[in-house]
Amino acid sequence: MQTIIFYSVALGLLLLSFIKDRAKTKQSLIKAFKSFANIVPQMLGMIASIGVILAVLSPQLISSFIGGSSGWIGVIIGAVIGSITLIPAFVAFPMAAILLENGAGYMQLASFVSTLTMVGVVTLPLEIRYFGKKFAAIRNTLAFALSFVVAFVIGKVVV
């Protein structure tokens, strides 16, 4: 339902923009389409990379490394695996539920999901291209470090 609301609001604002100034709205839509067309090949490459990684790393294999008894070693392994396999949140959370059912620990999943959604080794070239090396490095390093804070907090709250 939320998606329908967001799309409705976006479509309504686009219509309002079109009514206010047709030329600028058309120009903006053309620029948006060109930007999208430039990103599509890289996005397809990223999606293919993610598919290959997920085919190699099954949920059962991942949960064997990040089980509840693996401690901070499992948290580190989860963070590294999550950094390599960038997945959107709408896929990451159901995957985390499957991993939890297969014996993964809460702290390990916290670091895994945090890095999965926030750190992008696979998308780093794209991020460097658009934001620069320094910004990409700082953002990814801070996101990686934050995943350990999240794991610690989850460990204190849930366990």
Image: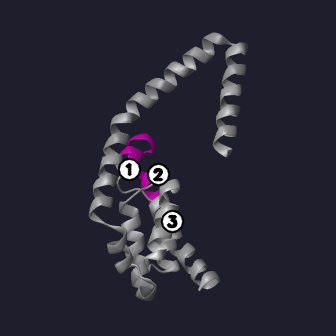
Q: Which residue is mark 3?
A: 114
Residue 39 at x, y = what percent? 40, 35
What is the x, y in percent for residue 25?
62, 17
* Residue farthest along the bottom direction in this orientation: 69
Residue receiving disc 2: 135
Label 2 SS: helix
Whether residue 99 is situated above or below residue 53 in the rendered picture: below
Q: Tell me which secondary structure the magenta stretch mostly adopts.
A: helix
Q: Residues within 10 Å of mark 3 (few under 14, many from 20)?
A: many
> Is the C-beta separation of discs 3 and 1 under 8 Å?
no
In this rendered view, identify the residue nearer to me: 39 or 65.
Answer: 65
| Nearer to the camera, 6 or 117 | 6
Residue 4 to residue 70: above or below:
above
Q: Quadrant of residue 27?
A: top right
Measured as percent of width and height from the top left, residue 4 is found at 66, 38
- Mark 1 or 2, closer to the camera: 1
Query: Which of the two residues, 99 or 122, is positioned nearer the viewer here?
Result: 99
Q: Amino acid at mark 3?
A: Ser
Which residues make up the magenta segment? 126-142
Question: Mark 2 or mark 1, which is nearer the start of the sequence?
Answer: 1
First-in-chain label (3 vs 1):
3
* Mark nearer the viewer, 2 or 3: 3
Identify the residue at horizontal 55%, vertical 21% (top origin): 29
Q: Which numbered disc covers residue 144?
A: none
State the image coordinates of residue 64 (x, y, percent, origin top left): 35, 79
Question: Which residue is tagged 1?
Answer: 123
In this view, 63 is above or below 121: below
Please tell me how crowded label 2 is: few (under 14), some (14-19), or many (20+) other residues with Cα within 10 Å. Answer: few
Please tell me whether residue 37 belongs to the stretch shown in magenta.
Answer: no
Tell me the quadrant of the picture where the C terminus can be found. bottom right
Q: How far is the residue under mark 1 from the one under mark 2?
A: 13 Å
